[in-house]
Image (cartoon, rainbow, N blue to C red):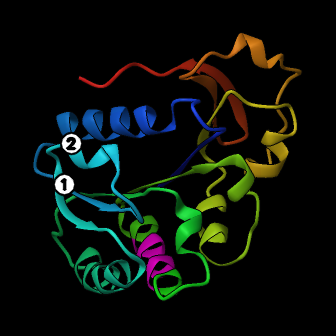
C-alpha cells in the first residue's frame, strides 16, 4: 500500500521514514529498497538502498524501469520511498511515479511518501495517488491536518503534547496516537 508521513519541520519525518524502512527490511530481508529524493538526504546513510534517484530526471528514468519490474510475477517485494514528494510534482517524474504508485498498490509493494504538511495538502498529480490510500502518520499534528491530509478527522489536539516523533497514525478511517521508535 501507500503510507504518507507528514509533519512540520523538525517533527521527526526523516527518522520516521528511516524507522519504517529499517523495520520493513528486517521483516523482509530479500526486499528491494528504492529512494527517490531531490537532495542529499540523511536517508542516504541507510545501507538498505538498491537504487537511488537524486533528481527529477533520474527519478523519471528509474520509475520507468521499476514500472516494468513491479508488475512481473515473482517480483521481489519492494519498498519505495518518495522523500519530499512535492518536489516531484508537475515535473518529468510526476507521471512515471504515479504509475509506480499504482503498480505498488496493485501488486502488493509498499510506498512511503514523505513531506511537510504545507506541501502535501493538494490532491493533484502524484499527491492524488499518495493520498487516495488515506493511510499515514502525521507528526506534531494540528486538528485540521486529519481532514486536509488523510480525509479523516483528528480529535482536538494541543501541539505541545506532541514532541518530535509523536503523532497520529491513520488507517481505514481510524486514528491512533503513536510514538515512533528510533531506527536501529
Which element is circle 2 on? loop
Q: CA distance from mark 2 to mark 1?
A: 7 Å
- Predominant SS of the magenta segment: helix
Horizontal and vertical percent position of residue 138: 65, 36
Q: Which residue is mark 2?
A: 46
Segment colored magenta: 96-103
* Above or below for 118 versus 168: below
Q: Residue at x 51, y 30 (%)?
A: 12
Residue 90 at x, y percent in the picture: 61, 83
**Left or right of 139 on screen, residue 68:** left
Tell which residue pokes out farthest to the front in this image: 40
Disc 2, disc 1: CB below 8 Å? yes
Apparent side of residue 46 relative to residue 59 in the rendered image (left or right): left
Q: Is residue 74 left or right of residue 90?
A: left
In the image, is residue 86 part of the stretch drawn in magenta?
A: no
Residue 49 is marked as 1
Q: Secondary structure at mark 1?
A: strand
Q: Quadrant of residue 70?
A: bottom left
What's the residue at 57%, 31% (across, down)?
10
- Of the pair 38 and 159, the residue shown nearer to us: 38
In-image side of 30 versus 54 (left or right):
left
Near-viewer residue (146 or 1): 146
The outermost residue toward the left is 30
> Going 70% across and 47% down the picture, which residue do you hit?
117
Look at the image and tell me in which quarter the C terminus lies: top left
Amino acid at each position: 500500500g501507500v503510507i504518507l508521513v507528514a509533519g512540520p519541520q523538525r517533527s521527526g519525518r526523516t527518522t520516521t521514514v528511516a524507522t519504517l524502512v529499517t523495520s520493513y527490511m528486517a521483516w523482509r530481508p530479500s526486499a528491494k529498497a528504492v529512494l527517490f529524493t531531490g537532495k542529499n538526504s540523511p536517508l542516504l546513510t541507510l545501507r538498505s538502498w538498491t537504487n537511488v534517484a537524486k533528481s527529477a530526471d533520474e527519478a523519471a528514468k528509474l520509475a520507468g524501469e521499476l514500472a516494468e519490474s513491479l508488475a512481473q510475477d515473482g517480483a521481489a517485494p519492494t519498498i519505495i520511498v518518495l522523500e519530499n514528494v512535492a518536489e516531484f510534482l508537475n515535473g518529468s517524474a510526476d507521471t512515471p511515479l504515479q504509475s509506480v504508485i499504482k503498480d505498488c498498490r496493485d501488486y502488493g509493494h509498499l510506498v512511503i511518501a514523505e513531506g511537510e504538511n504545507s506541501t502535501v495538502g493538494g490532491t493533484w498529480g502524484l499527491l492524488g495517488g499518495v493520498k487516495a490510500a488515506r493511510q499515514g502518520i502525521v507528526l506534531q499534528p494540528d486538528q485540521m491536518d486529519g481532514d486536509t491530509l488523510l480525509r479523516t478527522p483528528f480529535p482536538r489536539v494541543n501541539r505541545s503534547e506532541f514532541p518530535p516523533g509523536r503523532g497520529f497514525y491513520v488507517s481505514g478511517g481510524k486514528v491512533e496516537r503513536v510514538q515512533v521508535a528510533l531506527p536501529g
